[in-house]
Image (cartoon, helix red, strand yellow):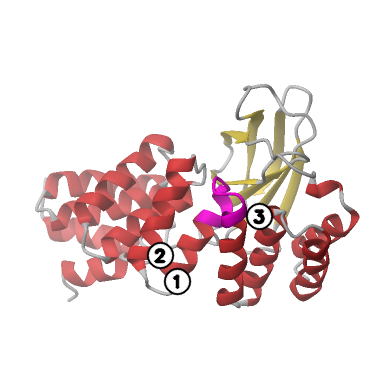
Amino acid sequence: MRTINNFILIGLSIVSTFYMAAFAATTGAVEGFVKDEQTGKPILKAKITFVSTKSSSIRLVSHSDKKGHFYRGGFTVGVYQIIVEKENYMPMQSTVRVSLGDTAKIEIKLRPFKGPPPLTKKISSKAISLLNEGKYEESIEKFTESIADDPENPIFYYYRGAAFEKTGDLDKAMEDYQKSVELKPDFILPTANIGKIYAKKKQFEMAIEFYKKAVELGDQDATNYYNYGICFMNLGKNEQAKEVLEKLISLDENYSDAYYQLGIIYIGLGNSALAKEFLQKFIELDPENKNASIAKEILKSLNLP
């Protein structure tokens, strides 16, 4: 019979932006607003792309209206990465969980970009289309042309880095993300992605440094908070992990995996009652999750009323 320690080891895994979630043959919806981070005013015609974290081929698109509002139905149940783009603004990324028959609510704040608006340029627009279509090598070629045309534009380096990352070339992706951050130190997406690459390389101290910076800059992606906490767990720093994961569920009370990991942490801290509470909440939120059966077995082992 597996012991609780076995279960704890299973729990410590880094989730990339393409975090896996169970799907069902049912649908839900996402609704929200896109606003200017500085003025709070609504942003018209922002492009909102939803990409399934289970399969990047599942992709839905919406646009904000004059009130900054958007609504998109027809989502298969699961977790989606949200990419929001608008000329003259820094692109932003977030994560949303879609539940059966429910409408997930989200607000996105975009930071104004000072400099030439990249999405109006023909080369970069084509490069982004190729990236979205999964034509990564062609996208890299186009972004390289964009960089030659405007070598001081951090967004081009970010997108080319994302394309390199898709091809599995983490070293080149890292170089582009670092260049993007060098040019634009408050650019959240490449900052968080540097953290993600360090986590993939199991360099957790370095990953924490960049996740922390992304959070301080105002990162809106719950998955980055989650990975930030998991890096602490992999270093055995459960108190710090607990702080980050509890902050995450205060921001997104439906982020089920955070409850699972908090249950594991509280077992390690000797607080079985709180461990039970978090594990039960995890199962309630996400009964089809791959770790749900493990959580159930842990609960049996705790022998609590």
Q: In the image, what residue type sits under mark 3?
A: Val
Query: In the rendering, at what x and y percent does residue 241 appear?
Result: 27, 52
- Residue 42 highlighted magenta (yes or no): no
- Which numbered mark, 1 or 2, is in the foreground of this view? 1
Against 189, residue 170 (above or below) is: below
Query: Horizontally, is 218 left or right of 265 in the view?
Result: right
Span shown in magenta: 181-191
Distance CA(mark 3)–CA(mark 1): 21 Å
Distance CA(mark 1)–CA(mark 2): 8 Å
Foreground residue among 52 and 99:
52
Q: In the image, what residue type sits under mark 2?
A: Ile
Sequence-first disc among 2 and 3: 2
Callout 2: helix, strand or loop? loop
Sequence-first disc among 1 and 2: 2
> Label 2: how many residues lie within 10 Å, few (<14), some (14-19) or many (20+)?
many
- Residue ID for mark 3: 51
User: At x 56% / y 76%, what residue is drawn?
Assistant: 171
- Residue 187 highlighted magenta (yes or no): yes
Distance CA(mark 2)–CA(mark 3): 19 Å
User: At x 67% / y 46%, what residue is drawn?
Assistant: 91
Q: Is residue 54 visible?
A: no
- What quarter of the picture does the C terminus occupy? top left
Foreground residue among 286 and 85:
85
Q: How many dots with numbers?
A: 3
- Residue ID for mark 2: 14
Q: Is residue 164 visible?
A: yes
Sequence-first disc among 3 and 1: 3
Question: What label does residue 200 carry, if any?
Answer: 1
Contact check, label 1 and label 2, Cβ < 8 Å: yes
Query: In the rendering, at what x and y percent does residue 258 appear?
Result: 35, 50
